[in-house]
Image (cartoon, rainbow, N blue to C red):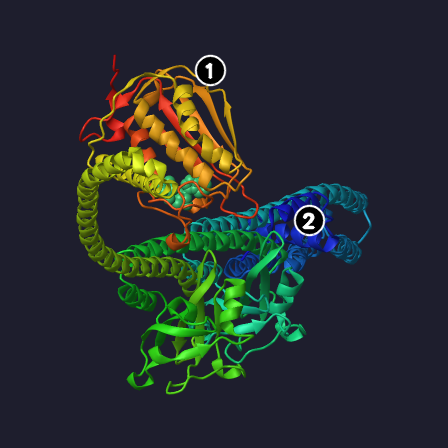
Amino acid sequence: MPAVSPDQVTDTQSQSLEIEIDDAALRQSLNADLRDSLRTITLALVVLFVIFTMRHLFLTAGAVGRVMTIASVITVALLLALAWALKRWHLPPKYAHTVIFGLAMISAGDTLLHLILAANPLQTTNLILIVVAVGFLCFSRLWWGVIVGIIDVSWLIAAMAVRESFTEMWTHFGVALISSTVVSFIVHMARLRTFRRLERLRVRDTQQQAQLKSALESTEQFRRSLQATIGIARYISSILDLDELLEQVAELIKRRYSYHYVAIYLLDETKSYLVLWAGTGEVGQARKAEGYQLEIDGPGLITWAARKRRAAGADDVQKDGRFLSTEDLPDTRSELVLPLQLGKDLLGVLDIQSNTPHAFADEDVRIFEALAAQIAIAIENARMYHRERQRRLLTEKLYDVGQALSSTLDLSEVLEIILAQLAEIVPYDRGSVMLRSDLVGGDGKALVFAAVRGFPEAANPLEMHVPIKEEDVFLEMARTQRPVIVPEVERRSDWEYLEDLPPARSWFGVPLILADGAIGMLSITRERPDPYTDEEVQLAAGFAGHAAVALENARLYDNLATAKLDLEETVAKLEERTEDLRLAYAQLERLDRTKSDFISVASHELRTPLTVLKGYSQILLGAEPIKKDEYYSQLVAGMQSGTARLNTIVESMLDMAKIDGRALQLHPESISLAMVLASVAKSLQDVLKQRSLNFVQEGLSKLPRIEADANGLRKVFYHLVVNAIKYTPDGGTITVAGRVLPATEGYYAKGGVEITVQDTGIGIDPHLQDLIFTKFYQSGEVALHSSGSTKFKGGGPGLGLAIAHGIVDAHGGKIWVESPGHDEETCPGSTFHVQLPLTARVLLEDESPEMAVDHTVG
Ligand code: ADP
């Protein structure tokens, strides 16, 4: 991993422009230059001394020539040996001056020898050359001084030794040597300065280049590392499975940066533990398998970083107090832990361990922080994807379950399907559907097992009632409308164990909720204390909703089916009764017909003897002997009034028989109702007087004439007024009023009239107000009736109103009574209404009144 960031590259460049080159470095550089020139100088000297050797051999005469030739040959040999050695071995620069000194001394020695042997100051020229050359070559003042000093002093000694007389020549060469020394010094100083400056620049340039190169290398490494990180970030963003994502991330980081161990921990739901989610190598796998987790408040670098929400690095774990050594990772030397955060939310941590100390530079921390942010986003994405997928699967699963549940309406089948589907969603050892007992005819204070699965046969739970107590899990569920999980049943002291059932280890209850509350619950038991997963809980809760609806539907359907059966039974019974009634009715009808026939026959049969009786009594009344005798006259008169009354009754019976037999003959004509009522009033005049009753007539004279049967209507009003007389105590009032009815649709298309007969009598019970219009109806005890036809509460055959009804009906009119009720004390009175059309309507044979047609009689 590179330790240089882009920022640092810039820093390095700016620093390098101000590099101070110290003397030692400069001297070393100059020495190196000198060292590099040594072979060339040596070889140049070889050439020079070969020339000298030739000259000494051929031109220098005598002993001097021989000695000098030998000296030159030795010098050449020495120089060649040096040249060879310089080529063969790498001479350290610091010895360059020593070698130069040696070369200068060999050359100077050779020249001085020649000077001494020849005793000729001309030989000094070589020394001058050597001095100048030293000035040119030696950039160290010490060496320059030593070489020039030795040469100058040696020349002086040689000159002194060989001089017989200090000639002008010697003086001249002495001055030349001193001058050359001065020149050499000046040249030396000038060269030294130039070389130093040049060298400084060169050294600086070299150093800059070196630094630039290193910076470039660092940048390149940094770029590559950044690219690797971006690569990881990009790669992980495409993984949507959380486990795979974290394992890949850990593995990639370990591989790309060659770390020792990389792990990723995620915060658990309670936010109190960091759970190892991925770890590299065998250690990681082993730890994951054992469910390795760290308490967030516990010791260690990892939990420290999680608590502080910032990167934690230990350059040397042995010196970092926060580091917690573990047996399975003994080689860790440095560690970097980075929190994985999304905004302010901590998701987990990324732990990187290296087996070398100081493995993480600041730049690494920065890069890994950026990577940690990317990992956090990828984790969130994976979790969101997972949640979304879960939701989709859940919906699909619930849809299938719903389909299965709605496939039948049979309650026992629904219960079986519920338990079968439940087992697929949440595998269980024992499962049951428990319902509130009031749903199955109980008091609702207990739960009953509606269906069970996985129960031992001996247990027979379907017979059991589990009382609902306070603090009960069922009540808790009913209140919160949420499932309840009891992971370890044994830990709940209030847990009720059912007889004959092996004890449960873990329990999971899901309420069955409908609009009006919890109708029961799904009870799931496992014999191992397995944790129920979030997915199972969610599925079970959703499933319970479907199950509750399916149960309710089945229950309603069941009720409906029962109700239908009941109804069918009732209908059958009713039909039976209807048949009985029909038979009874037919019998009654037959009896009624017999009765009507009897009335008809009897009235006809009675009529003949009655006419005879009437005729004879009439004759008797007119007979002289009777007339003379008052006593017999009274007897005959009594016979006559009895006969008359009997005649009235027989008439009524005949009318009734005609009405019953639909043989009533109407003779409509234009009549005045005022006249009809006047004749009725007249016939009852005496009775009204006798009973001190007021008879009032209102608006009758204003009534129009109507088409009707005068005789029939006389009978109608006769019966009504007679009744009014009968049921009104003495001194009461009978009011007969008439009014015109406006023309309306239907019967009264041409208008009509209404006559009301109102009395101040004893009134009629509302529930009898229809019944009194049926024939033979009489209220009260027949025996109690007063026998007089017009006496208060006098008796009658019970035909008056039936005849009135029949006649009005035959006219196409309506008759009814209104009365607040029957009371002989307060006498609330009754009002009989008779409505008649202006034009008479004749009821044709076999025609109901509704079907009657206008029948104007001209
Ligand atoms: P009846 O021959 O007995 O008068 P009706 O058919 O005329 O028979 O009357 C039937 C019954 O109606 C009577 O017995 C009586 O109870 C009741 N009723 C008729 N008219 C009146 C009335 N104006 N006030 C009270 N009750 C009456």
Which residue is at a point 25% across and 24% down the rendered structure image?
666
Which residue is at a point 52% across and 51% down the rendered structure image?
377
Residue positioned most to the top: 858
Q: Nearer the viewer, residue 139 or 23?
A: 23
Residue that label 2 marks? 130
Quadrant holding the C terminus: top left
- Please tell me whether residue 139 is drawn above or below residue 691 in the rendered image: below
Residue type indicated by callout 1: Lys
Q: Nearer the viewer, residue 719 or 613?
A: 613
Residue that label 1 marks? 702
**How many numbered markers are drawn?**
2
Q: Assign a secondary structure to mark 1.
A: loop
Task: Give the mark nearer the N terminus: 1 vs 2.
Answer: 2
Image position, residue 779 (x, y; %): 40, 49
- Please tell me whether residue 452 is drawn above or below residue 605 in the rendered image: below
Closer to the observer: label 1 or label 2? 1
Q: Is mark 1 within 8 Å of ligand 1?
A: no
Quarter of image, ligand 1:
top left
Q: Assign a secondary structure to mark 2.
A: helix
- Please tell me whether residue 80 is drawn above or below residue 453 in the rendered image: above
**Can residue 722 be seen by looking at this rendering?**
yes
- Residue 598's image quarter? top left
- Whether residue 649 sits left or right of residue 508 in the image: it is left
- Whether residue 771 sits left or right of residue 211 in the image: it is left
- Whether residue 473 sits left or right of residue 654 in the image: it is right
Q: Nearer the viewer, residue 317 or 767?
A: 767
- Please tell me whether residue 627 is drawn above or below residue 463 in the rendered image: above
Tags 1 and 2 touching, CB below 8 Å:
no
Image position, residue 66 (x, y; %): 58, 57
